[in-house]
Amino acid sequence: MSSKHIPVFSYSLLHPRYWGTLMLIALMYLLSLLPYRVQFFLGQRIGRLAIKLMKNRRHVIYRNLELCFPSMSESERDNLVKENIDNTGLALFETGMAWFWSDARVCRHVTIKGMEYIEQLEREGKGALMVAVHSMNLELGARAFGIKKSGMGVYRPNNNPCFDYFQYKGRSRSNRTLIDRKDVKGMLRALKSGERVWYAPDHDYGVRRSVFAPLFAVEQACTTTGTSLLVDATHCAVVPFTMVRDNDSGHYTLTVCQPVDGFPNKDPEAAAVFINKIVEQSIMAAPSQYMWLHRRFKNRPEGQPSLY
């Protein structure tokens, strides 16, 4: 990402139109100072309150689980929805942890496994596409990893310039920089030069540069072909990783997986099927901590009805 695109602070961000954003950032910072167990408790309650105000999102969570796991019993699905709502509220606090905690505090709460795979790729001078899914605690995972081995994150700039400034500042705190998700050339340059690029191909990003591939029980899920493009052009390693919180101890484990073998080159459709299998495995590491409130199956093949 070129420097001209890096958000910088200006006094215009203090305009009254941004006071709400500034108060939100200040609140996130103050809450991040609280003991972890207090944050955990408050996060669950906020999630339950918020979902009452956004009932349509509860429907999306339930519908996604219904589509992906049709054989799951209704009671199991209801319990998973409740857990997911709690984790959705906690995500606000986990973002604050990622943006404002000291390195020492992050390291006390996060254990990283599998770093030897990254070190081997470093010795080989090979770029790594770090494949993630949108778990609720992804921000904290990226921060923890970046303390040990910095990388470059792919993100969508926020339409609110004030929030975008703090988002960029927080996310790049232990990483080298962020790359606009539309800056494909920037991602290619980074991977070719042996960098690590964080990449989450699990959402529905629209039908442009996408194909329909199976995801769980949904036979045709709109899936980006960006993974195929990046791997084919750079011959980088594909390295999945997961970030999972243990609810009993409140401790997080970030697991870096071994670079995958058999990625289908020069075949975007086969690559989409392949990457969705990785996405499934990553989600199942902690299904209640995944961002099920996203309308993952909003785009359908032409002529097919909406699933929502």
Image (spheres, rainbow, N blue to C red):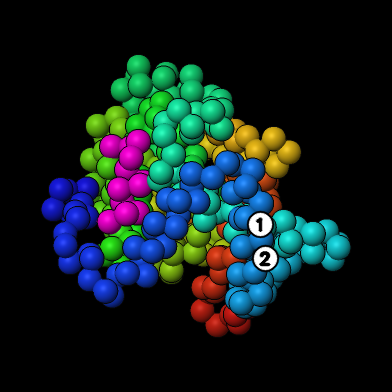
Closest to the observer: 123 or 172? 172
**Left of 173 or right of it: where is 103?**
right
Q: Is residue 167 magenta?
A: yes
Secondary structure under the numbered disc 2 in the rendered image: helix
Badge 2 is on which residue?
Answer: 48
Task: Tell me whether circle 1 and circle 2 mark residues in contact (CB < 8 Å).
Answer: yes
Q: Residue furthest left?
A: 4
Name which residue type carries label 1: Gln
Name the residue that disc number 1 marks: 44
Crowding near the residue tagged with mark 1, few <14, some 14–19, many ≥20 C-alpha atoms within 10 Å: many
Q: Which residues are magenta?
A: 165-176
Left or right of 244? Residue 6 is left
In the picture shown, does residue 204 fall above or below 201? below
Foreground residue, 261 or 131?
131
Seen at 28% across and 63% down, the residue is: 162
- Residue 217 in sight here: no
